[in-house]
Amino acid sequence: MHGKWWQEAVIYQIYPKSFKDSNNDGIGDIQGIIEKLDYLKDLGVTAIWVCPFYESPMDDQGYDVSDFYKVSNDYGTLTDIQKLIEELHQRDMKLIIDLVLNHTSDEHPWFVESKKTKDNPYRDYYIWHKGKDGCPPTNWESFFGGSVWKYDEITDEYYMHIFSEKMPDLNWNHAQMRKDIYRMMHWWLNQGVDGFRIDAVAHLDKNCNFVNRSIPEGRLYSPCYDEFSNRPKVHKHIQEMVKDVLSFYDVMTVGEAGGASLDDALKYCAYDRNEFNMIISFDHCWVDVDPCSASYLPSKWTYKSLHLPDLKKSLAKYQINLYGKAWNTIFWSNHDQPRVLSHYGNDSTAYRKKSAKMLGTVLYFLGGTPFIYQGEEIGMTNVSFTNIDDYRDIEIFTLYKETVLNHISTKEDIIDRIQKRSRDNARTPMQWDDSKNAGFSQSEPWIKVNPNYIDINVEDNLLDKGSIYHYYQKIFNIRQNTKTLIYGDFKLYLEEDENIFLYTRSYQEETYIVLANFFEKTIDVVLPEEICWKKAEIMICNDIEKPLSRNMKLHPYEAIVYRIL
């Protein structure tokens, strides 16, 4: 499985609402993306993944689709999308679009019809069920907090929504619904898109036995996400999707499967499974959660100090066990995660640039297709809004309501957790320059700009030859010019070391050594003899160049890559 275009791609994820506003209405748009294609091309990007731009009431910022065939007026028109495809292809770049298959908006015509009567032809496009003794069918908790069930007075039944109540779940057991979805997929592929990132695909199969589960102390509902995550029938649906749609096109598919185990990942994307090309799993994004510290909260809102061996093992697990069997994705963050520089790095003025370069070094020399999230390449950070009204993510308001307003936790505690973990950390406007609104728009943006845009912006990065942007540019140039960093194997060293990340990538006669200090202290490290006996050239480093030797001293956040001669 060598030589596929998506294996040798560098993919840049764009959250269109926050990328670039071309018409100055405070909302990013498709024309804004087109304006910045040369910037992305110069970085080394070969494909872009654009988050949903479909018609939507924007309850969950576009992941609640009301019409799959229309482009939201906020973002432009279908003509704009066609122009984006044309401009990308002229630059030998590709377009991957988000495909939302688990749910629709409650304003989608299918659901509007589904609500009318129990015998409506669209009724079973969704998951409806009678209540039990005046209560919802189960006590299951939604990913966004609250119950997974919403009562509908018209038909005296509940519909399932594992996310927002305005995002009813589709019933993938319904053959005609699946056919309508496949028809839509064909339509977009015929427009010329080059691939799909399939949102929340792990949840297409639900346990329809609908049995109550235990509720942890302090919680209102049961966080039994296994009732609707990574269940067996998902794979039957995906294989049908491949047979009926994807097999007719040379396209890339990457499925989002949060919470998937290693075995699950192999089921989704092993070469012999005839399912997806790649899978996105979030193991390494969650190694610092600590559910025991706040059992009254979903685990994503908890945290502890990073224990580096946990992160190394999480990344290595996929590098080693997927090698030769399936293709990896490598990424630090996306629109659902906090900014990696604030999460696993150091966003202080003293170490921001150096730790950002270290994080880029550690990740992008791994095996798999790189996914860079917008703003990562210039060192954008979390935002510290102190007023809950400055946030926009629906998930935050449910959290706030269920904890602070129910007196389960304090406002200060929850705001602190939101500042560290909120999805809005990744959704503030792209920081293009130090002018008003960071050059994103001449009008007030839909969400406030991070105040640090004065010091952290694209213009400054482009002018500074020692910037994070130029360092990322060099990483991708090195990566794209050797088969070893694309197809080579992986070996982790010093697995239990709590400060040092050390691994090699080897292919045929070539080996790269990647060495990094993950923390704000100088570390003396003794390298394994087997990787130090040959001469090596330095490929890239974020500190003073130093020769490879058995005994080395690494400064705070120092990273260096050697190529064995």
Image (spheres, helix red, strand yellow):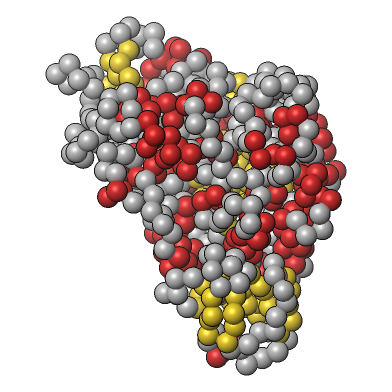
212 displayed left or right of 308? left
Q: Is residue 48 above or below residue 31?
A: below
Residue 178: x and y in percent read 48, 31
Q: Is residue 116 above or below residue 385?
A: above
Q: Is residue 198 visible?
A: no
For the N terminus, give its image quadrant: bottom right
211 displayed left or right of 288? left
Q: Residue furthest left?
A: 133
Please give the name of the residue rendered at 30% of the width and 8% of the height, measured from the top-left corner.
153
Residue 522: x and y in percent read 56, 73
Q: Is residue 122 visible?
A: yes
439 displayed left or right of 61? right
Please give the name of the residue rendered at 80% of the width and 44% of the height, measured from the top-left corner.
459
For the C terminus, give its image quadrant: bottom right
Residue 19: x and y in percent read 69, 35
Please give the name of the residue rendered at 67% of the width and 44% of the height, measured from the top-left corner.
375
Please give the name of the residue rendered at 57% of the width and 27% of the height, measured from the top-left corner.
62
**Residue 236, quarter of picture:** top left
Residue 211: x and y in percent read 19, 34
> Which one is nearer the viewer's eye here, 471 or 264?
471
> Which one is nearer the viewer's eye here, 376 or 558?
558
> Which one is nearer the viewer's eye here, 360 or 73?
360
Total marks shown come to 0
**Residue 398, quarter of picture:** top left
Q: Is residue 181 above or below residue 554?
A: above
Q: Residue furthest bottom?
A: 533
